[in-house]
Amino acid sequence: MNRTLATTVALVLAVTAGGLTAPALAAAPRAAAPAATEAVPPLTVPADSELLSAGGTGMLTRTGAGTTATVYRWTRHADGVTTTLPAGTHWGSPGTDVVVSRSGAVYTLTDMSGAVEPVVIDTSALRAEAATYTLQRVVGRALLMKEDVAGVDPFHLVSLEDGRVVDREVAVPDGDVVRYNYSTGPGSLALFHAPTGSTTGTLSLVDPATGALTESYATKNLRPGSVALTPTHVAWVQDPYSSADRTLVLAGRGADPGPHQTLPLASPGDPTGTVLRSLGDWLLYTNPGGGTADSPSALHPLTARSAKTGESFPLLDHTGAPCPTPTAACSSSAAPSTGARACIGSPRTRPPASPPRPSSAPSGSRPPSPS
């Protein structure tokens, strides 16, 4: 019989004369009768905006990346008011309203909600003539930095505690080099590290408060964008660019994780890298670019899969480039010629920890299928 689908809640960004607007779309919960939803005023940002991070009260976007005309903006969820940030590079902290700016060796962490005063971290004392620190990402109110030492490149978590700068080296095993780093929010950090020249390594979870490795998983051939963390599981796509050997691996977290679960993601003739994101207890994965691909692929749809139950279903027919922040897993919901985009589970709509299935989908998405 047909299953009744209910909403995940999506924000669809559609190109208008004024740029991108984001009206909220919502459908009924699993109950047969639809539920009323609160109207949300639209957001408007420039059409070429790239979403960098999103928190409880707003989102950080960027236009003109890689050019001399790069502009960063902060847009509030409540009323759509946008603030253009001062010239220079800015970093977002996933899942928070913190935006980081830099002046030389001094980093300023500003809570754009105005709830707390800015935090200033002066890293000049950490820098020596033979080694410098470079910012890799922001984890809550800590800076994940790489110390540039030939042949070593250790990683550090730098924060301000009781008025002093604290530098904690991340406890990566000797001989290993950090290839990629991931974060889904203030309390989460994962690193893929491996011996120099090896594609086989370890995916480790890091305690941002101490720099200690708390959980580790042997894996290989990981790539940026192919790791996701949920409250109960760690997931990654092994060999994400292999059309034959690509595999979704799901590992339990904690003292008794149980055996790994694997799901083959073979897609003959499609070497596009699989992108993986998380939303509460759900995993979202897709091979971007289906709207302009020369041939179909089973991985073009944006698919949601429960880390707890294994339930899965398609959300969208194809995607563009999913956004880097887990609090707003953003992807193109229609052919690029329309410019439409969707943000699944934007903080603006406060999605539940385990989103129900949508009873209606944005334009360009797959209709419900019988089961």
Image: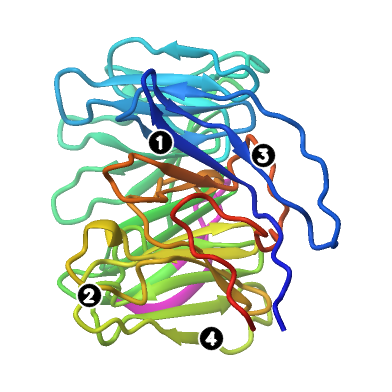
Q: Which mark is residue 52?
A: 1
Q: Mark 3 points at which residue?
A: 349
Could you tell me how far apart the alpha carbons at marks 3 and 2 are, in whole angstroms?
34 Å
Instruction: Find the magenta span and give its range.
Output: 204-220
Q: Mark 4 points at which residue?
A: 260
Q: Which of marks 2 and 1 is in front?
A: 2
Question: Which amino acid lies under the numbered mark 2 shown in the image of this protein?
Answer: Asp
Q: Which colour scheme is used?
A: rainbow
Question: Which amino acid lies under the numbered mark 1 shown in the image of this protein?
Answer: Leu
Question: Which amino acid lies under the numbered mark 4 shown in the image of this protein?
Answer: His
Alpha-carbon neighbours of circle 4 within 10 Å: few (<14), some, or many (≥20)?
few
The residue at 52%/78% (across/down) is 250
Question: Which amino acid lies under the numbered mark 3 shown in the image of this protein?
Answer: Thr
Could you tell me how far apart the alpha carbons at marks 2 and 4 are, in whole angstroms?
26 Å
Q: Which of marks 1 and 3 is in front?
A: 3
Left or right for 22, reference 52: right
